[in-house]
Image (spheres, grey):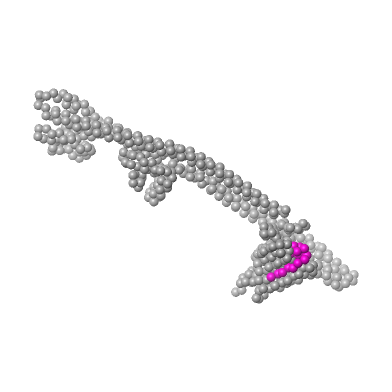
Amino acid sequence: MNIYSKKQHWKIYLLGFAAIIVGLSLYYTNTLVKKIAEDERQKVRIWADAVQNRSSLVRVTDEFFEEMRNEERKRVELWAMATRKFIEDDGTGDISFYARVIEENTTIPVMIVGANDTIISYRNLREDGEVIRYEGKPFEGEIKERFSRYDPIPIAYAGQEDYLYYQDSWLFTQMREVMDDLIDSFLSEVVINSANVPVIITDSAKTSIIAAGNIGNGELDDSQFVQQTIDKMADKNQPLVIELPSHGTCHVFYTHSFLLTQLRYYPYFQFTAIGIFLLVAYLLFSTARNAEQNQVWVGMSKETAHQLGTPISSLIAWIELLKMEGVGDNTIAEIKKDVGRLENITERFSKIGSEPNLSLKPIAEAVEEAVDYMKTRTSKKVHFAIHNHSSNNPVVPLNNNLFGWVLENLCKNAVDAMAGNGSITVDIYDNTSKVYVDISDTGKGIPKSQFKAIFNPGFTSKKRGWGLGLSLTKRIIENYHNGKIFVKNSSPEGTTFRIVLKKEKTG
């Protein structure tokens, strides 16, 4: 198993391990959120019960005040009757009872007004602790407004009719203030609740907001937002119905706290952020690794070219010496071809990492040169064929030396895949802007899972191979010619590689 197969397996293992970690984390967080949600539901239930109980207390207290108001009305009516009896007495009857009724009223402010709206008498009326004299003054303005809350009680005697006006007793007024404070406190405790849940209290029509808590104040000015929030709350929880003395029937809408909502979605945001961080880190490390690999490639190629230079110079000197020794011309010619080949290889390595020098050349001509060279150095059992399917002879920007190296590498791999016996076919196609060169063999094929891996440095299926040929081929095509190379198709009957090159731009 080569290093890239191991790398692929490790990627799968690490990805699976990461998926397990993410799954377990999400499961644990989900479980935690469910427990917190259940605890919150318990708090909300307790809070809702408390709201109901406090609402009942407020309602009962209000009923109690209503009874007190009725009792005070009865006391005032009794006081009016006693006053009338006291006035009508001719001195012959016992009026001590009526006098006692009148005297024992020490808390209810009362005022008797004549038919001409003139104040006749009053009782229990003070302002800032001082007794004010109102006899004979007109019943109008502020004093009339203060005593007009309740309907007056007529007092008829001796052919005339006066009217008795009254206010709530001092005791009742003080208790009423306590009641109002109780209602305000109740509303505050509902909206600022220990469960920290968003709350909206509306009127019976569910349109007017009486109070709200744990919701942005600025957002309450938006009627559309408020209505949407109320609808969402109603979907989550059945609204509570309460009775308030000053507001009548009210509805309490509530939902889960913002903390629970944030906690529910926090893991997804967390893993998204971690995923983005890991992706950026991977891209940075991958870029750094590729840059390092490029430096290694360039350094290795330059060093190889340098190392070949010295023995090639010696071989040229030896050729001249062999000439003087009388070696046959045919032998000298073949040796010169091989030395020239070595010089060509040295030039190829020296160009790796340098700015590519491309020149326009017919693609068919470049293909024929490379294939002709391979024919003379390959077994006669390997048959070569070139088919030019283009209507004309397309011209492409090429570095002929490097492009020949690509075709030689592909042909050598094809020969190895066929075990030195088979056929290699090169087909040339073109369209409007591109040229396609397909190199097909009749070898044993390549598994589909390795279509991309075979271009990685070090990948090889040979026992003695270095796995550099196809990697170098890919770099030459993509980095120097701005083209593409890939496995077009493969089966046990053979493999086809496709090279895509851009044609010369015509004005």
From the top left corner, tell me how far across and down residue 304 is, in percent: 76, 60
Q: Is 372 positioned to the left or the right of 138 in the image? A: right
Tell me which segment is drawn in magenta: 413-427
Q: Is residue 59 left or right of residue 133?
A: right
Please, which residue is most extreme toward the right here? 325
Q: Is residue 481 visible?
A: no
Check the image and report above or below for 389 versus 109.
below
Instruction: Determine if the magenta segment contains residue 52.
Output: no
Q: Position of residue 394 (x, y in %)?
A: 66, 73
Tell me: residue 310, above or below residue 133. Answer: below
Where residue 342 sits in the image (x, y, percent)? 79, 65
Q: Is residue 323 above or below residue 206?
A: below
Which residue does the image show at 18% across and 35% down from the upper left?
153
Point out the image quarter for the C terminus: bottom right
Which residue is at 64% across, 71% downward? Answer: 430
Q: Is residue 60 above or below residue 378?
A: above
Q: Quadrant of residue 473?
A: bottom right
Number of marks in the rendered image: 0
Q: Position of residue 437 (x, y in %)?
A: 68, 69
Q: Quadrant of residue 201?
A: top left
Residue nearest the viewer, comparing 390 with 449: 449
**Horizontal arrangement in the rendering, residue 228 relative to residue 357 (left or right):** left
Residue at far front of view: 492
Residue under the image location 9 percent in, 32 percent down: 158
Residue 17 in view: yes
Q: Residue at x 62, y 50 (%)?
A: 15
426 inside magenta stretch:
yes
Query: Which residue occupies the foreground of this view, 176 or 417?
Result: 417
